[in-house]
Amino acid sequence: MRLVRFGEPGAEAPGVLDADGVLRDASSLTADWDGPSLAPERLAALARRTADLPAVAGWDPGHPAGSGGVRLGAPVARPGKVVCIGVNYADHAAESGMQTPSEPVVFMKDPWTVVGHRDTVLVPRGSTKTDYEVELAVVIGSTARYLDGPGDALAHVAGYAVSHDVSERFLQLEGTGQWDKGKSCETFNPLGPWLLTADEVPDPQALELRLSVNGEQRQHGSTAQMVFGVAALVHYLSQVMVLHPGDVINSGTPAGVALGFPDPKPYLREGDVVECSISGPGADLGAQRTVMGQA
């Protein structure tokens, strides 16, 4: 299923995009797409009732990324935490001048950075090094705590989404302190357009990621190139923190970020258009289109 949240910011309602691209209102079944509603048994019950849900007026099935005046917000209500994995693609580590890590590099991102897939992303005041990163977002569906091994991990995943992990490189790398500073500016994590449930993703390590800026392709990679795959990440994180339903894991980005270009590096500016997409055999996570604004 493709789970979405539609409506104005702060007043989104839960919905489902059916096989024909019709947006259906799931408010009769759940208050929101949050932790409890993402449990496997809840999603299985919902799948059996999708056809009975009412269609949302004004939605154009021909443009399922959001049209007809109907806004799609982030497909998951405010996550308890956003856990990010750094330098998880060897080619990105190389372009960043970093070693390929021997274990996952973990940092956190303010959950309030999560916005809808077409919402404006704001370049911070005074920033000259705002960067882009397309990533596979892994959304937790059931509590993961001290899992026995990677083989147990994917059963705890509710689904996957396109994530744009925006960064301010001066704050992240050149200032003092932690990476979180350069990752947690307002609007720095567009998510969606939808959450594709895990049963619709045959292999999370067979997905293709693309990102372009103003129509020019900057990133093109595959989750097959991850240093640590999704199962390994969920297992690893469960050893150092409790993953709760609704938590989001940004699983890393392939090469092609602005930081890796020669000077002058093509960092983002107000008015730039960033487009991200993720797809693979039997799995379409959709596409984002973000217009950069100014804080």
Image (cartoon, rainbow, N blue to C red):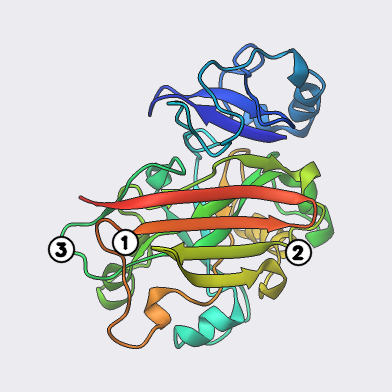
Direction from residue 105 to residue 155 in the image, left or right: right
Identify which residue is drawn at 53% across, 29% down: 5
Q: Sequence order check: which comes first, mark 2 or mark 1?
A: 1
Q: Earlier in the sequence, mark 3 or mark 1?
A: 3
Q: Residues within 10 Å of mark 1 (few under 14, many from 20)?
A: many
Residue type at numbered disc 3: Gly
Q: Nearer the viewer, residue 200 or 110?
A: 200
Which residue is at 67% across, 15% downward?
Answer: 29
Relative vertical location of residue 203 with respect to residue 52 in this rendering, above or below: below
241 and 184: which is toward the camera: 184
Which numbered disc flags the more N-terminal residue, 3 or 2?
3
Residue 19 in the image, given as x and y percentages of width and height? 74, 32
Q: Residue at x 72, y 30 (%)?
A: 20
Q: Element type at marker 1?
A: helix
Of the numbered discs in the image, which one, if any, rests on residue 206?
2
The tag on residue 181 is 1
- Closest to the camera, between mark 2 and mark 1, is 2
Where on the picture, by quarter, is residue 100?
A: bottom right
Give amino acid for label 1. Answer: Lys
Snapshot quadrant of residue 176: bottom left
| Residue assigned mark 3 | 126
In the image, taking residue 189 as reference, residue 245 lies left or right, namely right
Is 39 drawn above or below residue 237 in the view shown?
Answer: above
**Could you tell me which residue is drawn at 57 percent across and 56 percent down?**
277
Where is 92 relative to 45, above or below?
Answer: below
Residue 143: image location, x then y, percent: 68, 41
